[in-house]
């Protein structure tokens, strides 16, 4: 299988000895993101909702650079603050995959 390092200027550059993503065959492994604005490499201003949106914008940019999309993701590991923030105004009975899909599609609750 071929291994390809993924890079895009539409997401923050990797800080350290890792890549934004690695594509092996048809699978893409994205590195974690923090709410940095790619153009300035500074934290986005605003509340946690703005930070969450920025993180997903960054992840989306990397996924697209790899030729995919977040809608096709098989799994996501989210810190508790993200899921707690999203669940606070989402349907409490929503399953984790459904919640992640809503977060990825920028549901109004963020």
Image (cartoon, helix red, strand yellow):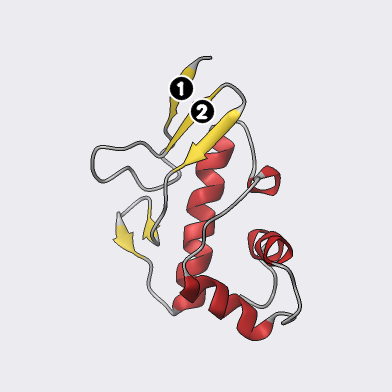
Q: Position of residue 87 (x, y in %)?
A: 63, 79
Q: Where is 42 relative to 66, above or below?
A: below
Q: Which residue is at 45% across, 44% downward?
A: 10
Left or right of 36 in this view: 97: right
Q: Where is 85 relative to 58, above or below?
A: below
Q: Position of residue 23 (x, y in %)?
A: 51, 28
Examine the image and state in which quarter residue 72 appears: top right
C-alpha span from label 2 to label 1: 5 Å
Q: Crowdedness of circle 2 by 10 Å Cα count: few (<14), some, many (20+)? A: some
Q: Residue furthest top?
A: 1
Q: Position of residue 17 (x, y in %)?
A: 24, 37
Q: Earlier in the sequence, mark 2 or mark 1?
A: 1
* C-beta proximity under 8 Å, tags 2 and 1: yes
Q: Where is 35 relative to 16, above or below?
A: below
Q: Which residue is at 44% across, 80% downward?
A: 47
Residue situated in front as seen by the camera: 5 or 45: 5
Which residue carries the number 1 mark?
4
Number of on-image labels:
2
Which residue carries the number 2 mark?
23
The local secondary structure at tag 2 comes to strand
The local secondary structure at tag 1 comes to strand
């Amino acid at each position: 299988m071929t291994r390809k390092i993924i890079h895009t200027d539409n997401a923050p550059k990797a800080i350290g000895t890792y890549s934004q993503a690695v594509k092996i065959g048809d699978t893409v492994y994205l590195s974690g993101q923090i709410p940095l604005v790619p153009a300035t490499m500074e934290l986005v201003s605003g509340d946690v909702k703005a930070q969450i949106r920025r993180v997903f914008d960054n992840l989306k940019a990397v996924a697209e650079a790899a030729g995919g999309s977040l809608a096709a993701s098989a799994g996501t590991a989210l810190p508790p603050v993200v899921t707690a923030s999203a669940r606070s105004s989402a349907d409490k009975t929503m399953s984790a995959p459904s919640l992640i899909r809503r977060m990825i599609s920028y549901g109004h609750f963020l």
